[in-house]
Image: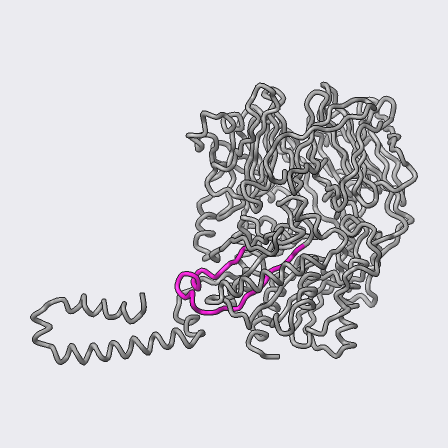
């Protein structure tokens, strides 16, 4: 209904008395004319003055503090035991125990009052893909705190306070370790040098209050925090490092620093060791006030086609005999390089057994071994070679489970014109060749195996289903007598399109963290009930809210988050793109016909999903809300969740087809939503691989297609990136065929560029931006540059500055100002 009709209807209601109309006919006519004229003027202002809407509509704008207040404040939930529904969780206050929906503090952070260091809670992680981390309204945005690790029975709490690291080398990150007895509050310094010790890694036993720690590249064992003395587990040295991963393994494979694995019964410890003294270094510089010279940090970092990669060995230590044995891993070709891909303790035929999985350098062949402590041999059990343009991922085997003498892990399963990651069952044959059999699941990717109930013969797994942008927990019966049909166990949970679940040891319960589509929350799910066919009519009886955090729910509801539109757009006869278009709420609800700028947020890395149905607030949401912009996210070829047909499309050609799809879809979206989006004010923003994509998209687009571009920590040529990541996706493609964003750049004469990079970036080295800067200067192209000294890949303590710089840049770029 138009504004004119609204005003006229209002007058009719006010002048509803007929006698009054007759008596005041002349006045009424005059007033009516005035009202109509005013209404027409009002309509003209709305239609032809876009800035008018900005001033007259009430608007809740997101700001930098919302990065903190809107993040889910709880993390790291875990079961205390299988016997009850008690759960412990990490929060900003400390370690809390949750029972019957009520939490109480078990161990507060103030218990270690001298531990005042901080850990990063930046909205971007160090990994190749940006991700959000938890936070709370009570702490500053870049707050850090001492990490807390409880023992299995909550009797002790280990406090890990980060130690000084002058060169800021990520491989030199250490901490001071103290263990507090929660009953008597007695504190014990852990380490060979007491309170002066710097510890590299620490791990409680699963079953008792003993633990191991790494100091000076060696592993030590301690039976109790109170006892004097330690047991030396390994003999590491300057070049041989025990119990730790190097940079490339931590970043690209295991996503953790410690290389320590306790057996399920807690009587043996597996650990990995590496020798990296032959690998080449990258030198990073940090700058410090009142120090005349910068500090040089040398980081082992093998780049694409490097001749030497770090070599790993695997050992098992028995705490009863206090003997360690290095395993003889019997691979068919021991002369070629192998990655250690997975180390996993499993119960096989009632015995704790170590399984290790190794991959070739291109990561398209795997070898699974079964390790025996007594003989110190890991014998080859299974080999698999992937079809062309496919590769292995760490989680394919890291989440494997066992039942009896069978192992269950993930492999590609060809179905019609596609292939999906499905669960494969392998019965151990002790050397005889056997082919794994696939469980009969749906046409979707399984992302992880979460547990197995050996009593009911039920396996639990996560999948990108019912829609590719979702994550759900499923069950599948392994019993031949049961109906062979997967069940979605989290689909009935309210507001749970992106579920992350932690299944207890007996696979009878699960802690489910629902990350979207609106306010995140956590429930306790009864798996036995949930898979019961009779409970389908009463789904709410299968789960209970773990915590009723109404204040957090209210903050999310009141934040005025953007309205999200999801669609599927055809890009060819074979492929569809998925989009997620976010429109500022006040624009969508009250001013749909006002054209606003469009910010394309791109990542585009292999197997990534940018359109997932989860709630997240990143810096792009803050900038877009403040500037009243729409945000567009696109998943095309190369993205995950839709099988190998999509994933394989980028193999050997990073920076090609995924760029084409982004550009094609943007054009379609601008046409379909032309009433809301201004095609003359389009910007692209990306970080890391997304920075590479943002630069590539400007290069490949028509001149002036993008008004401006923001590229943060970009790869400019994967020849400069690490070998493990690059070779996984590029295979044997020669370096001269790699996409190099510095070869074109002419479009940046008309597209304004803001380039941002941390000078201490250990992931995507500043070398990438330095080469780009030089080429832009050689071509006489003007651009904006913001460098961040002493900042790593995520710019951890510069979030507010990044937001401010980006907002200022886009505002002036869209206004046509320098």
Residue 313 placement (x, y as % from top left): 86, 36
- Disc tally is 0
Q: Position of residue 475 (x, y in %)?
A: 57, 30
Residue 158 quadrant: top right
In percent of the image, x 84 and y 61: which residue is there?
736
Tell me what residue is drawn at x 51 percent, y 70 percent: 678
Of residues 310 and 63, the one drawn nearer to the viewer in this rendering: 310
Left or right, 253 with respect to 506, comes to: right
Closest to the observer: 76 or 806? 806
Of 691 and 807, nearer the camera is 691
The N terminus lies in which quarter of the figure? bottom left
Viewer can see residue 126: no
The residue at the far front in this view is 573
Q: Is residue 537 above or below residue 717?
A: above
Residue 581 colored magenta? yes
Residue 133, position in %: x, y? 61, 49
| Position of residue 719 in the picture relative to residue 122 (left or right) | right
Q: Is residue 85 above or below residue 34?
A: above
Percent of width and height locating residue 492: 47, 36
- In this rendering, the answer to whether 12 lies above or below 412 is below
Position of 310 with respect to 544 (left or right) is: right
Colour scheme in the image? one colour
The answer to whether any part of residue 52 appears in the image is yes
Location of residue 41 by image quarter: bottom left
Residue 236 falls in which quadrant of the image? Answer: top right
Magenta region, residue range: 580-604
| In magenta segment, residue 280 | no
Quadrant containing the C terminus is: bottom right
């Amino acid at each position: 209904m138009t504004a004119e009709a609204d005003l006229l209807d209002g007058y009719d209601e006010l002048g509803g008395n007929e006698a009054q109309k007759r008596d005041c006919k002349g006045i009424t006519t005059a007033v009516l004319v005035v009202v109509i004229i005013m209404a027409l003027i009002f309509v003209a202002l709305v239609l032809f003055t876009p800035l008018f809407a900005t001033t007259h509509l009430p608007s809740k704008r997101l700001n930098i503090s919302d990065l903190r207040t809107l993040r889910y404040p709880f993390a790291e939930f875990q079961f205390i035991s299988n016997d009850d529904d008690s759960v412990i969780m990490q929060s900003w206050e400390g370690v809390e125990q949750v029972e019957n929906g009520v939490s109480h503090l078990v161990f507060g952070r103030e218990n270690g009052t001298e531990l005042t260091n901080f850990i990063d809670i930046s909205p971007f992680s160090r990994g190749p893909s940006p991700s959000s981390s938890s936070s709370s309204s009570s702490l500053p945005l870049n707050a850090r705190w001492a990490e807390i690790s409880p023992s299995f029975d909550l009797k002790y709490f280990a406090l890990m306070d980060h130690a000084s690291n002058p060169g800021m080398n990520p491989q030199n990150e250490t901490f001071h370790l103290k263990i507090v007895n929660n009953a008597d509050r007695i504190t014990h310094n852990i380490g060979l040098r007491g309170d002066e010790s710097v510890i590299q890694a620490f791990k409680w036993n699963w079953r008792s209050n003993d633990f191991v720690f790494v100091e000076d590249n060696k592993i030590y064992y301690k039976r109790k925090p109170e006892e004097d003395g330690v047991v030396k587990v390994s003999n590491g040295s300057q070049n041989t490092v025990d119990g730790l991963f190097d940079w490339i393994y931590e970043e690209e494979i295991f996503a953790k620093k410690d290389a320590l694995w306790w057996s399920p019964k807690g009587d043996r410890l597996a650990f990995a060791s590496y020798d990296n003294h032959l690998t080449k270094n990258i030198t990073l510089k940090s700058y410090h006030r009142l120090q005349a010279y910068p500090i040089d940090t040398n980081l082992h970092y093998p780049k694409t086609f490097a001749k030497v990669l770090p070599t790993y060995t695997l050992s098992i230590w028995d705490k009863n005999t206090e003997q360690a044995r290095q395993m003889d891993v019997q691979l068919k070709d021991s002369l070629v390089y192998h990655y250690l891909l997975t180390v996993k303790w499993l119960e096989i035929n009632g015995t704790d057994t170590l399984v290790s999985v190794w991959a070739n350098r291109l990561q398209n062949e795997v070898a699974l071994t079964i390790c025996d402590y007594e003989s110190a041999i890991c014998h080859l059990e299974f080999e698999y070679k992937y079809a062309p343009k496919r590769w292995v991922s760490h989680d394919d085997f890291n989440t494997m489970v066992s039942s009896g003498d069978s192992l269950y892990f993930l492999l590609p399963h060809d179905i019609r014109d596609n292939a999906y990651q499905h669960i494969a069952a392998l019965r151990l044959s002790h050397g005889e060749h056997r082919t794994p059999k696939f469980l009969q699941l749906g046409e979707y990717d399984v992302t992880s195996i979460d547990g197995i109930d050996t009593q009911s013969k039920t396996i639990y797994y996560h999948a990108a289903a019912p829609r590719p942008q979702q994550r759900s927990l499923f069950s599948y019966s392994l019993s031949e007598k049961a109906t062979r049909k997967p069940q979605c166990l989290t689909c009935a949970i309210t507001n749970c399109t992106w579920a992350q679940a932690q299944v207890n040891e007996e696979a009878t319960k699960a802690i489910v963290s629902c990350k979207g589509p609106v306010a995140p929350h956590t429930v306790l799910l009864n798996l036995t009930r949930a898979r019961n066919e009779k409970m389908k009519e009463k789904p709410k009886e299968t789960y209970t809210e773990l915590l009723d955090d109404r204040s957090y729910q209210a903050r999310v509801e009141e934040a005025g988050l953007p309205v999200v539109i999801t669609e599927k757009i055809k890009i060819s006869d074979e492929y569809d793109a998925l989009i997620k278009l976010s429109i500022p709420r006040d624009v969508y609800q009250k001013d749909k016909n006002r054209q606003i700028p469009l910010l394309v947020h791109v990542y585009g890395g292999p197997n990534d999903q940018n359109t997932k149905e989860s709630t997240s607030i990143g810096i792009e949401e803050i900038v877009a809300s403040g500037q009243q912009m729409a945000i567009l996210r696109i998943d095309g070829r190369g993205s995950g969740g839709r099988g190998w047909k999509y994933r394989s499309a980028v193999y050997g050609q990073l920076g090609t087809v995924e760029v084409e799809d982004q550009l094609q879809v943007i054009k379609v979206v601008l046409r379909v939503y032309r009433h809301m989006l201004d095609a003359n004010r389009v910007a692209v923003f990306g970080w890391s691989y997304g920075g590479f994509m943002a630069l590539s998209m400007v290069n490949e687009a028509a001149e002036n297609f993008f008004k401006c571009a923001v590229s943060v920590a970009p790869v400019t040529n994967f020849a400069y990136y690490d070998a493990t990541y690059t070779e996984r996706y590029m295979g044997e493609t020669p370096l001269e065929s790699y996409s190099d964003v510095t070869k074109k750049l002419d479009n940046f004469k008309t597209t304004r560029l803001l380039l941002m990079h941390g000078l201490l970036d250990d992931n995507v080295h500043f070398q990438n931006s330095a080469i780009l800067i030089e080429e832009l200067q050689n071509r006489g192209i003007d651009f904006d540059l913001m460098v961040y000294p002493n900042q790593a890949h995520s710019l951890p303590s510069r979030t507010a500055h990044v937001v401010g710089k980006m907002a200022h840049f886009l505002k002036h770029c869209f206004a046509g100002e320098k």
